[in-house]
Amino acid sequence: MCADVHRVEDQAGRDGRGSEQHRLEGCDAGTLVETFEHVDPNRLSDARKFDAEGHLHASRMNIEFEELAYRRTPLGELILRRRTEPALGVEVFEVKLGDAFLMSSLFTAGEIALANLGLAGLGSGPLDVVVGGLGLGYTARAVLGHPAVRSLLVVEALRDVIDWHRRGLVPLGAGLSADRRCEFLNGDFFALVDSPGIDSRDLGRRFHAILVDIDHSPRQVLHPSHAALYGREGLRRLAAHLHPGGVFALWSNDPPDQDFRDALAEVFAQCDAHIVTFRNPLQDRDAANTIYAARTATASCESGSGTRASRLDSS
Ligand SMILES: C[S@@+](CC[C@H](N)C(=O)[O-])C[C@H]1O[C@@H](n2cnc3c(N)ncnc32)[C@H](O)[C@@H]1O
């Protein structure tokens, strides 16, 4: 059965993502992997100068923000920018794709809670973890903050986002890139879940935790191809990549969803929905994310529960 809804107050308060800024509606993640690789310098604004590899060399700056990276894509302009939030006097990193804010460093409580709630109760390790969706790296960094973690594989659809981290353009990039436990994998997380193995070098590899922060919520997905993961069959396919007793955790911008919790309860031995609340100082109100954390049966339970964490053929 899916257990209680837990409320986690963010005492530091003030780290959490505002719902308005986070998600990209209608973006084609499958297309993202294939199309974000090339810059056409001839079609770029004169205000930006690029080196031979297409990296932004001289950024545009105006009084509101500094543009750190730019790429024109079929889905709109992908922009990494830095600005000082005047109301708070803090430096903010933001990612825009087209007119939408993909993510912001101003609100990160939910991302960090995803790691901490996902890894809670997994013991002293060594743990092998997957994060779906690199973003600005707050979930990944929180994972690596757990000494029990032996390895972290971060699956990210946008090569540019990985590149920003490797080049130290984003605040957490240098630290993540230097951590020998952390590896970036450019790919479509959903396709990898449906494949025989998330790690193509070792298809039989299983993980102790898979933590996902890609879609707005199980109901509001970036692309229709993502939706299947959140149904019973998709969850079974995901669970097949976990060790017995392993954890699937998911960030959501919506309140706990009973249908989704029912699906989790059918596939996993245990599941919880945690509400993470935080202050949005820009709007002077509280905001909340939901973190789902579901666990496969342990080895001893598995023999009794049969198919709960078994792999389904993706054919
Ligand atoms: C909201 S951000 C993740 C934020 C992250 N938890 C953090 O701490 O900064 C979502 C990320 O998922 C990536 N993404 C979108 N579709 C994807 C897919 N199909 N597979 C893997 N990553 C994807 C986006 O490019 C973006 O970097």
Image (cartoon, rainbow, N blue to C red):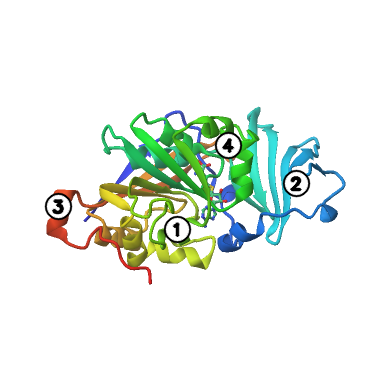
Crowding around mark 2 (Cα neighbors within 10 Å: few <14, some 14 to 19, many 20+) is: some
* CA gap, disc 2 and disc 1: 28 Å
Could you tell me which residue is drawn at 38 percent across and 61 percent down? 196
Q: Amino acid at mark 2?
A: Gly
Whether pointer 1 and pointer 3 mark residues with C-beta atoms closer than 8 Å, the reply is no
- The numbered dot on residue 192 is 1
* CA gap, disc 1 and disc 3: 27 Å
Comes first in the chain, label 2 or label 4: 2
Percent position of residue 214, x then y: 50, 52
Res. 256 image quadrant: bottom left
SS of the residue under disc 2: loop
Q: Amino acid at mark 1?
A: Leu
* CA gap, disc 4 and disc 3: 42 Å
Q: Is residue 82 left or right of residue 6?
A: right
Could you tell me which residue is drawn at 81 percent across and 52 percent down? 41
Q: Amino acid at mark 4?
A: Leu
Q: Amino acid at mark 3?
A: Cys
Crowding around mark 4 (Cα neighbors within 10 Å: few <14, some 14 to 19, many 20+) is: many
Foreground: disc 4 or disc 3: 3
Crowding around mark 1 (Cα neighbors within 10 Å: few <14, some 14 to 19, many 20+) is: some
Residue furthest right in the image: 46
Comes first in the chain, label 2 or label 1: 2
Whether pointer 4 and pointer 3 mark residues with C-beta atoms closer than 8 Å, the reply is no
Whether pointer 2 and pointer 1 mark residues with C-beta atoms closer than 8 Å, the reply is no
- Residue at numbered disc 3: 301
Whether pointer 2 and pointer 4 mark residues with C-beta atoms closer than 8 Å, the reply is no
Comes first in the chain, label 1 or label 3: 1
- The numbered dot on residue 222 is none
